[in-house]
C-alpha cells in the first residue's frame, strides 16, 4: 500500500513536471506571438514605421538570447529553482512596464527586459528535461516540447487578437503578466532537479570555460548552428506574417490569428513525426532540406502569383519541416553538451534568438512578400549545410 502511494505521488509529480516544462518552453512563442495581431495598430499608435515595430521582436529576442547565456551557466552553479524564480520576477516587472510605455523607444527597452526575464524559463525547460532524461527518452521530451511550441503559437495570436479587440494591446500584456504569476506559484511545487553534488563549482571564469569547452565540440556546434538557422526561418516568417496577411491579403486581426495558429500547428506535427526516425541526426537533415524546398517554392509563387493559397500551403509545410530540425538538432546538441547542461541549453536557445533577432528587421526592407521567403531560403540553406556536416562527422 505504501509502495502504491509512493508510485502514485511520483506519477503525479512527473505529470506536473511535464505541464510545467511545457509552459516554460511556451514562453518564447507567447512573448513573441501574442501581440503579433496588433502590429499594424502599434504602428499607428506609436506613429512609427513597420521596421521599428518589428524591432520590438528583435529587442525581445536579444533579451531571450542574452538572458539564456547568463541564466543557463548560473543554474549549473546554483541550481535550477533559484535562477528560475529570479527570472520570472524580472519578467513580471518588465511586463507591467510594457503596458505603460509612452513611446516606441520605451516600449523597445521594456521588451528587451521582458525577453531577459522570459529567457530563464526557456533555458531551464531544456536543462531540467536533460537533468531528468537521456537518449531516446530525452528525444521524446524534446518532441513534446516541440509540440508545445507548435500549440502555443496556435493559442497565442488567437488570445492576443481576442484580448486586443476588447482591451487593446495593453490587455495582451496583462495576460502575459498573469501567466508569469501562475508560473511563479508553480515554482513552489517544483523540486530542484540538479543535486548539489552535480553542480559546477567555481567563479565567473568557470562560465566562460564551460562555453569554450562546448564550442570546441564540433558536432555540438554543427547542430547548434543548424537549430539557429531554423529559428531564423521561423522568425522571418513570424515578423512578416502580420503584414502579409493583413496588408497584402486584407485579413482582419482575428482571421490572421486563426490562420497563423493553423500554420504553427505544423511545428508540433513535425516535431512529433521526427520520432519516426531512428536517428535524430537524420531527422535534422530531412527537416532542413524540406525547409529549403518550401521556402524557394514560396518565393517563386509570391513573385509569380501572389496567391494566398500558394503562400499558405508553403508556409505550413515550411513550419512542418522546421519541427524536425527543432527536435533533431536540440536533442543531439543537448546530448553532446551534457557535461554542462545549463550552458549547452543556453547556447542552443541563445543562438536561435540571435538568429531570429538578426533576420526579423530584414523582411521589412522592400517588398515583404519577396523578402520573407528569400530570407527563409537563405537560412534554410545554412541549416542544411550545418546538419549535413554534423551527420557526416
Image: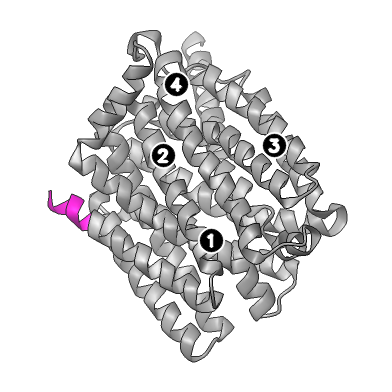
**Along the viewing direction, whichever of 210 and 172 lies nearer the viewer:** 210
Residue 95 is left or right of residue 204, and the answer is right
Classify residue 273 by image quadrant.
bottom left
Mark 4 element type: helix
The mark closer to the camera, 3 or 4, is 4
Residue 210, position in %: x, y?
Answer: 30, 25
Mark 3 element type: helix
Residue 26, position in %: x, y?
Answer: 56, 43
**Local crowd size for mark 2, using a 10 Å CA cut-off: few (<14), some (14–19), many (≥20):** many
Q: Report the residue marked by disc 2.
A: 141
Q: Report the residue marked by disc 3.
A: 179
Tell me how far mark 2 sits from mark 3, CA to CA: 22 Å
Magenta span includes 215: no
**Local crowd size for mark 3, using a 10 Å CA cut-off: few (<14), some (14–19), many (≥20):** some
Mark 2 element type: helix
Tell me how far mark 1 sits from mark 4, CA to CA: 32 Å
Residue numbers of the magenta segment: 387-393
Tell me how far mark 4 sits from mark 2, CA to CA: 20 Å
Q: Is tag 3's residue or tag 1's residue first in the polypeptide sequence?
A: 3
Q: Is tag 1's residue or tag 4's residue first in the polypeptide sequence?
A: 4
Amino acid at each position: 500500500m505504501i509502495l502504491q502511494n509512493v508510485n502514485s505521488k511520483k506519477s503525479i509529480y512527473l505529470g506536473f513536471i511535464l505541464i510545467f516544462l511545457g509552459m516554460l518552453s511556451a514562453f518564447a512563442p507567447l512573448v513573441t506571438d501574442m501581440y503579433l495581431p496588433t502590429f499594424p495598430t502599434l504602428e499607428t499608435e506609436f506613429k512609427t514605421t513597420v521596421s521599428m515595430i518589428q524591432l520590438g521582436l528583435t529587442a525581445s529576442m536579444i533579451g531571450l538570447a542574452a538572458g539564456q547565456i547568463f541564466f543557463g551557466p548560473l543554474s549549473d552553479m546554483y541550481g535550477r529553482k533559484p535562477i528560475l524564480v529570479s527570472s520570472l520576477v524580472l519578467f513580471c516587472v518588465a511586463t507591467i512596464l510594457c503596458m505603460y510605455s509612452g513611446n516606441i523607444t520605451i516600449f523597445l527597452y521594456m521588451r528587451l527586459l521582458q525577453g531577459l526575464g522570459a529567457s530563464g524559463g526557456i533555458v531551464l525547460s531544456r536543462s531540467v528535461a536533460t537533468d531528468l532524461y537521456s537518449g531516446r527518452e530525452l528525444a521524446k521530451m524534446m518532441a513534446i516540447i516541440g509540440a508545445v511550441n507548435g500549440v502555443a503559437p496556435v493559442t497565442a495570436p488567437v488570445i492576443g487578437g481576442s484580448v486586443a479587440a476588447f482591451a487593446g494591446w495593453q490587455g495582451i500584456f496583462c495576460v502575459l503578466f498573469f501567466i508569469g504569476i501562475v508560473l511563479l506559484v508553480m515554482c513552489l511545487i517544483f523540486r530542484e532537479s540538479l543535486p548539489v553534488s552535480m553542480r559546477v563549482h567555481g567563479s565567473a571564469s568557470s562560465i566562460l570555460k564551460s562555453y569554450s569547452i562546448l564550442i570546441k565540440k564540433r558536432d555540438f556546434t554543427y547542430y547548434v548552428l543548424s537549430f539557429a538557422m531554423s529559428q531564423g526561418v521561423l522568425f522571418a516568417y513570424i515578423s512578416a506574417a502580420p503584414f502579409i496577411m493583413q496588408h497584402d491579403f486584407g485579413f482582419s486581426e482575428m482571421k490572421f490569428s486563426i490562420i497563423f495558429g493553423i500554420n504553427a500547428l505544423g511545428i508540433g506535427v513535425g516535431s512529433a513525426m521526427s520520432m519516426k526516425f531512428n536517428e535524430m541526426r537524420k531527422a535534422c537533415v530531412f527537416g532542413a532540406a524540406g525547409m529549403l524546398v518550401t521556402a524557394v517554392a514560396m518565393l517563386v509563387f509570391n513573385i509569380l502569383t501572389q496567391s494566398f493559397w500558394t503562400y499558405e500551403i508553403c508556409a505550413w509545410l515550411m513550419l512542418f519541416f522546421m519541427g524536425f530540425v527543432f527536435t533533431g538538432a536540440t536533442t543531439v546538441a543537448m546530448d553532446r553538451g551534457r557535461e554542462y547542461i545549463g550552458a549547452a541549453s543556453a547556447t542552443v536557445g541563445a543562438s536561435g534568438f540571435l538568429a531570429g533577432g538578426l533576420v526579423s528587421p530584414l523582411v521589412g526592407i522592400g517588398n515583404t512578400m519577396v523578402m520573407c521567403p528569400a530570407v527563409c531560403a537563405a537560412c534554410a540553406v545554412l541549416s542544411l549545410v550545418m546538419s549535413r556536416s554534423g551527420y557526416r562527422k
